[in-house]
Amino acid sequence: MSIQSVKDLQTITSNVRSRVEGLLADNGGLLRLAPCWVPRSFLQPGKRLKLHPDDLYAFGLNRGGIDERWFGSTTPAANDNRTPDEGLSYVVDGGVRFTLQTAVAECGGAIIGDRIWSKYNRWPVYSKFFDNMGPIPHHMHQSQAQAALVGQEGKPESYYFPPQHNNVGNNFPYTFMGFEPGTTKAQVRRCLENWNKGDNGILDLSRAYRLKVGSGWLIGPSILHAPGSLCTYEPQWGSDVFGMYQSLVEGREVPWALLVKDMPKDKHQDLDFIVDQLDWEANVDPNYKDNHYLEPVPVADTRSEGYVDRWIVYGKVHGEQLFTAKELTLDPGAKCTIRDNGAYSLITVQGKGKMNKLNLDCPKLIRFHELTEDEVFCTETAAKAGVTFENTSTVEPLVVLRYFGPEVNPDAPTLGAYRNNTF
């Protein structure tokens, strides 16, 4: 692949519809996306995103290190002092680029499908690689009703720990989730009262789960979780709301402002309101793992054909299927046609090959401004017609991850289905 730089591309906002139509015709219903990097000022990068080490602080030291790469995103990152387009994926067309957000706004159902466009008027989900050296604070993401109080949307999310990005587990490959059964609201309130005394002790009320490479979790809104140090693929709702309930992490202060940033201003000191933001039943669930843990489930036994497609994210949140994800693996030299029910965003995590007319190539190392050939957005029309994948390598598998929007896959497994997997 010839190295191109996003710095060399002209950003446009006009004639987007005609450009999208041309790209879809040329590429068999696919759009090439550029890498989208996001920093977090309160975290330490885990160095497994394949971003060049000289570029970890490309946004500036004051903005923090880059510990996330977002995929198929039309959702802005909720960072202080962010760049205007931070968190937004760009479509690449020769020497120009434009945001996927603009493309969807211009073309609607031609990209994401008429059902999703008519209901949400946007691509309502996204995914990311989330990669840190250690754990992050015990936090939750607001529900739809809670986020609406501040003009935002709620954020359920899911996790999958891809082997290709977890050659090392870093400092703490365990995640605290929820509370021990029997925990009381008064105990949590006391942790908030102790915020400025140092470690407020909220993890003393929680339970840590060892993270297993190749597995995952489904996390509903208003559930506390302190993600551990595995690099994580995270399909989620298109929002960046959160509230952090832990005051000190690995000796680093967590400002009170990060607890209340997505709560009404008149509630920023209302401890009872803050405690009640938590879904209490879900947080103290004695069967928490059974109700949230995921392992891959093959779509079908196609091993004899040289490929396997597996569900890696499935299940419902409060009765709704908000997102799903699959992992497709092709043996060296294998070729297959995959039909899906809706649009999806794809990232290549191993190998090289082709997807319809587009090249796929998983890079070994990426410079901050470098364009890659590992990320693609597939339209609903192309997905339903069938996308042809080919592994052009003779030595290693081609592995791609793809996530889907809401209610796209009614045939997806239910939680716990991995226990019945026979191959």
Image (tube, grey):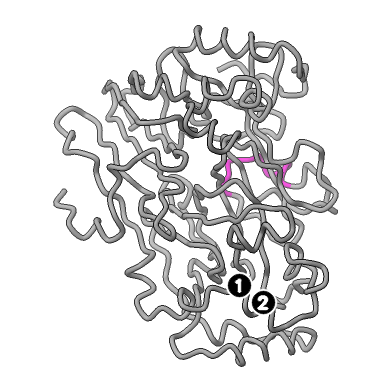
Residue 52 falls inside the magenta stretch: yes
**Magenta span dominant secondary structure:** loop
Q: Quadrant of residue 197?
A: bottom right
Secondary structure at numbered mark 1: loop
The CA span between labels 1 and 2 is 5 Å
Residue under label 2: 246
The residue nearer to you, when weighing 359 against 364, is 359
Category of crowding for the residue at label 1, using alpha-carbon neighbours closer than 10 angstroms: few (below 14), some (14–19), many (at least 20): many
The residue nearer to you, when weighing 291 against 161, is 291
Q: Quadrant of residue 277?
A: bottom right
Q: Quadrant of residue 186?
A: bottom right
Residue at the image point whose x is 54% and y is 44% from the top = 127
Residue under label 1: 138
Apparent side of residue 198 relative to residue 245 in the rendered image (left or right): right
x, y (%) of residue 201? 63, 87
| Amino acid at circle 2 | Gln
Residue at the image point whose x is 69% and y is 78% from the top = 273
Q: Please give the range of residues in magenta.
A: 48-56
